[in-house]
Image (cartoon, rainbow, N blue to C red):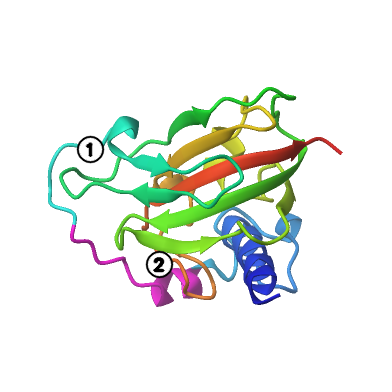
Amino acid sequence: MRKTAAMTALLISTVLAVTGCTPSERPSDLPEGGAGSSQAASSAAAPTSTTPAGPPCTIDQVTATGAAGQKPTVTIPATCSPPAELLTKDLIPGTGAAIKTGDQLQMHYALYTWSTKKENQASFGDAPFSATLAKGQLIDGWVEGLVGMKQGGRRLLVVPPAKGYKEKGTSDGSIKGNETLVFVVDAVKVGA
């Protein structure tokens, strides 16, 4: 129950962070970079990182172990810098329907933050996370990075800040601004 409440809070934080809204505002009421975004941006501290300066990591340098349906273990290297672009890799190819923008999804995920190299949250062991793959509903890293993944598959995503929570971070402070995110996502169900 506690994990379900935390996932619900993350989904709300995600929608609010992506749209820049407070709970009482609707995204269509705000211009680009609208009200509420400056306070969040100034209150979120940049993550501290022990990652040495160096060339950006490749997707093959970030590893994830574990079987589909089981909580994965992710290893983020300390020998390279976080990449500036979205990286994706299918760890387990699915055999079902391929995800496309606008699809209703049921997913399991584990989220690691680059700066800590530790798990931040995971849905494994709870009910799958449900959402529509659409801009404004999920972070851009998911909207762009999950397209083409097949039901039953597992995908690794490395999401730079520009496609995650940007400089603001999440409203609850669980993810700081300018954080690179590493997700392992299992596509449990694609479509209604």
Q: Residues within 10 Å of mark 2 (few under 14, many from 20)?
A: many
Segment tinted magenta in the rendering? 38-50
User: Hey, which residue is sitting farthest left in the picture?
Assistant: 53
Q: Is residue 136 left or right of residue 64?
A: right
Q: Is residue 133 magenta?
A: no
Residue located at (21% from left, 45% from top)? 81
Q: Is residue 117 left or right of residue 12?
A: left
Q: Nearer the viewer, residue 47 or 126?
A: 126
Residue underneath mark 2: 176
Q: Amino acid at mark 1?
A: Pro
Residue located at (62% from left, 24% from top)? 148
Horizontal and vertical percent for residue 169? 46, 65
Q: Residues within 10 Å of mark 1 (few under 14, many from 20)?
A: some
Label at residue 148? none
Residue located at (50% from left, 45% from top)? 184
Q: Secondary structure at mark 1?
A: loop
Horizontal and vertical percent for residue 85? 37, 36
